[in-house]
Image (cartoon, helix red, strand yellow):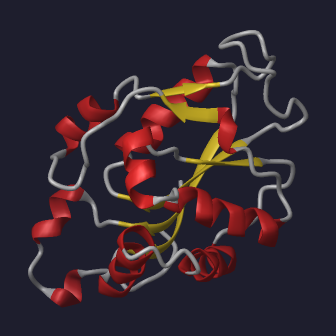
Amino acid sequence: VRSAVWLDEEARQMIHHLKYDGLSTLGTEIARVVVRSVPRVPGAVLVPIPLGPRRLHRRGFNQAEVVAGALARRWMLPLQPSLLRRQRETRTQTALDPARRRQNVRDAFAARSRGGRRGGGEGGDRAAATVILVDDVLTTGATLVAAAEALRQAGWPRIGAVTFARALPYAARAVTDPAAVPARGWR
């Protein structure tokens, strides 16, 4: 997993405005920051982490798909949102500890088969060696791990991920000394 910035207050505000204020144009700015920090993977396909139908209806868009679309244009890579779907609604992860986050997203995703044999889909991009999952923020990694597992089960052997922001490790979040918090940058 590659992340462009630490989840500091500025990054948190950008994500909040993108997700909850409908400022989808921030997806382009977020992609610009990611492209400066994370190298392009030639031959990869970009797959945004899908939202459940209720959350998608409430927001009107999927923030990960907005960012992934902007990344696809900048990196000149294919965007394949239909490769992965959320097969059940999940609770919001914000107030959950790491164990509950893993439980919340366990078996939440299903992927189209690389060869098109499972799930009735017509398959993904067979020439692509790597699927790059795209999400706005990495907190514990539970969502990305669950999505990657669905892709592996569908025959996609090489899976990476890119996020705009990465939260401090769960155990380090209680640190009260601001000097102990790493500067922004790729981690």
| Residue at 59% in and 18% down | 153
Give how far across and how far down residue 49 sits, in percent: 52, 46
Q: State left or right for residue 123 relative to residue 180.
A: right
Give how far across and how far down residue 55 sits, in percent: 38, 49
Looking at the image, which is closer to me, 100 or 18? Answer: 18
Give how far across and how far down residue 18 sits, in percent: 45, 74
Give how far across and how far down residue 173 sits, in percent: 17, 67
Vertical position of residue 180 compared to residue 123: above or below: below
Vertical position of residue 102 compared to residue 34: above or below: above
| Residue at 76% in and 9% down | 117
Looking at the image, which is closer to me, 13 or 162? Answer: 13
Vertical position of residue 72 compared to residue 111: above or below: below
Quarter residue 114 falls in: top right
| Residue at 24% in and 41% down | 91
| Residue at 21% in and 90% down | 179
Q: State left or right for residue 101 relative to residue 37.
A: left
Q: Is residue 115 something one can see in this rendering?
A: yes
